[in-house]
Image: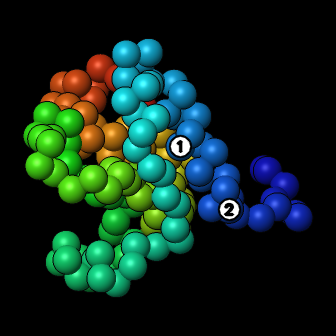
Amino acid sequence: MTDWTGREAPSLDDIFAMAEAARAALPEAFRAPAAVVVLRVEDLAPDDMLNDMGIEDPFELTGLYDGVPMTQKSVMDPTGPDVIWLFRRAILDEWADRGNVALDALVAHVFVHEMAHHFGWSDEDIAAIDRWWE
């Protein structure tokens, strides 16, 4: 059994670092365009975001892409940066519920799933890059 004495739950910065490692591990062709997407890590999604999505339980939302996918961008789009939001407590809750996946693998999976929205990837595209179930 692992000794958890003196250990703390992963912080916002820890989750951020795991997501940045996932960004760095993307195939080379995607690293530069992925670098312009802002990464934000919060404990839970804010109420206004949950309300906009019709989600009542904040633990149901582990991540969110907020932006215009590259496949749909035009010069007429607002100039604000695209953002990937990761929600630490919801991710930790899913990690605990699963019990069979490393936390960094789960964070990478959520990050890649949200990045997929930015790139306009299909499920097959995601599976080729994020084989986290193996």
Q: Is residue 57 left or right of residue 14?
A: left
Location of mark 1 (residue): 19
Query: Is disc 2 placed on a helix, strand or loop?
Result: loop
Q: Amino acid at mark 1?
A: Ala
For mark 1, give the secondary structure. helix
Q: Nearer the viewer, residue 43 or 91?
A: 43
Q: Are marks 2 and 1 in contact (CB under 8 Å)?
A: no
Q: Is residue 3 placed above or below 74 in the rendered structure?
A: below
Across and down, in percent, residue 93 comes to 49, 65
Examine the rendering and report whether any part of residue 36 can be seen: yes
In the image, 112 versus 131, the foreground residue is 112
Residue at image point 45% right, 50% down: 38
Q: Position of residue 29 (x, y in %)?
A: 37, 16
Figure quadrant of residue 122? top left
Determine which residue is flagged by label 2: 11
Residue at 32% across, 56% down: 80
Q: Residue 98, can we see it?
A: no
Q: Position of residue 5 (x, y in %)?
A: 87, 63
Counting residues from the start of the chain, the first of labels 2 and 1 encountered is 2
Q: Is residue 13 above or below residue 8?
A: above
Q: Residues within 10 Å of mark 2 (few under 14, many from 20)?
A: some
